[in-house]
Image (cartoon, rainbow, N blue to C red):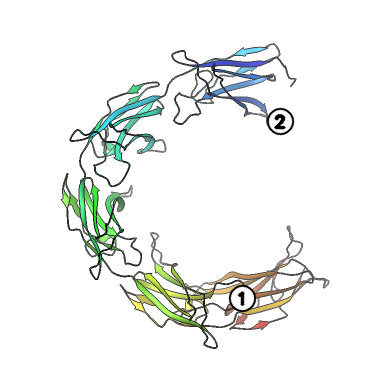
Amino acid sequence: AQLTATSLLHGTIRDTNGAVLPAITVELFGYVDDGNGGQVWRSLATTFTNDQGRYAFPGLENGVFRLYVYDPQTPQRYLAEYYDNAGTFEGATDIVMTEATLERVIDFELANKGEIHGRVMAESGQPLATILVKAYIPDPQNPEFWLAVASALTDQEGNYQIVGLEPNTYRVGFEEYEQPFRYVPEFYNNVLALAEAQAIVVAAGQRVTAIDAALATASQIRGRVTAADGSALSGQHVEVYEPFTNPQGVEAWVLKAVGTTDNDGYYVAPVAPGRYRVGVTTAMGYVPEFYDSADRVEVATDMLVAFGQIVDNINIVLDVAGSIQGAVTDEAHLPLQAMRIEALQLVTPTTGIPVWQASRIGFTNSDGTYTIDGLLPGRYRVRFSDGSTPRHYASEYYNDAADFADAQWLEMGRSTIVTGIDAQLGLPNTISGVVTDEAGAPLADAEVQVWRQAPQATGEILYIPEEWARTTADGSYQVTGIDQGNYKVSFKSGELPPRYRQEFYDNVRTLAGGRMLTFTTGMVVAAINAQLS
């Protein structure tokens, strides 16, 4: 289209009282060629109003346009809109500019966003500062749930104002922002559940006032946390859980409050009236414990707490977690320093399918000894490996097992100390060879991958990619750091897209048909060659 230098789209933006609005964002959209024979709406330019509330888009081509204006501040003071007074892009009015249109004036009058004001006090009448006040709306995806869309903190006099609200129906909640919590959270108007809160309708530009609250003093759960020897455990987080029934009707327990122990092990956890269970699960070096002598929240003892009630003597005694000790040497019985020892625990996640996962790790000292502590009751396997690069020693599992499936289990109880979990590590294995094309010319940068056979408990045989290398300019390669076990080797071209077909040793196309290589320790196997077609 031919540009018309004098074509100008401009205007002034005011509020509903007629005051000009500076620093308002104005975005110009145009209906333009999409490059495929069609047309599409695209954002073309953005500008801001000046101190007189004016904006301008000069030098426009002939075409069809739309305008969007909004307040860039956070929180926004004014309702955004599309020309002409539309809330959505689809509802916007087209602005047609032609050669005959030398100038077009489009003004806007923006309505203020809504506000909710109020005051928060204690039941005694004392103003409460730093209370977090939240405004909620129904979740558009699930109307049974509510989303917090705006918030404010009360000042020293307990006053608050939530600004920047779109026209909508809201519910308002009050809760403490800082610990320790002293008051029971509630919702307007004096209810404990969001689902029971009173609806508050906020129109465009409306200031809703007197949304006040008088918070009740919180009930308390109190007690002491000690070790099994009676010593106080300070700085421990005491977790308070409350029941929650999910949409499937299954009761679960969710964290509601936390108390922290003082230097003498005592804690206070303020709570609202309700049913609770208490535990300590994050004490380093100790086994998680729930009141009363339970290992998980599902079997813990209930506590029913009434308004203003102090439930005392909810004491928890923590057992020291278990540990595994041993030594790592080489085949000459010399101690190995900085070897990595990993304790793998059998756990059952929410899926209900038991899996092995890393629990704790440790490293050997200069004399080859190690200790892994902090182990919870359960079943473990132990892996020994050289963490250096390149590796100087082969990995293995306790007790002298090459594969995880063959590793010996260790049963750990509460405070169990297992000693003598030793390992004697041999040298890793090495393979080498040459990769060429069918004419015998060396292939540089080809990838050589070693695949470890990994039998599964189900009887399935998997192959896990482990060590690998690339060929040099003469087609030669060397793969080091191979642990004991059964392996297959693959070769593939280094180019993208590949010029040569992948194959497996010895001259087959599939992993299943590949020749098995069995390694113990310290083996050097040469002439593992490949000729790629």
Which quarter of the figure is the N terminus placed in? top right
Task: Give SS at disc 1.
Answer: strand
Residue 448 visible in rendering = no
Mark 1: which amino acid?
Answer: Gly
Task: Give SS at disc 2.
Answer: loop
Q: Which residue is mark 1?
A: 481
Report the residue at 63% width, 25% height from top: 30
User: Depth check: 402 or 280 in front?
Assistant: 280
Q: Which residue is mark 2?
A: 37
**Above or below, comparing residue 449 to residue 88 in the picture:** below
Q: Earlier in the sequence, mark 1 or mark 2?
A: 2
The 10 Å Cα crowd at callout 1, few under 14, some 14 to 19, many 20 or more, is many
For the residues carrying marks 1 and 2, which lies nearer the camera in this image? 1
Quadrant of res 325:
bottom left
Residue 54 visible in rendering = yes
Q: Is residue 67 left or right of residue 63?
A: left
Q: Is residue 423 left or right of residue 28?
A: left
What is the x, y in percent for residue 449?
65, 70
Quadrant of res 503:
bottom right
Report the residue at 61% width, 25% height from top: 29
Report the residue at 21% width, 50% height from top: 275
Q: Is residue 205 left or right of residue 128?
A: right
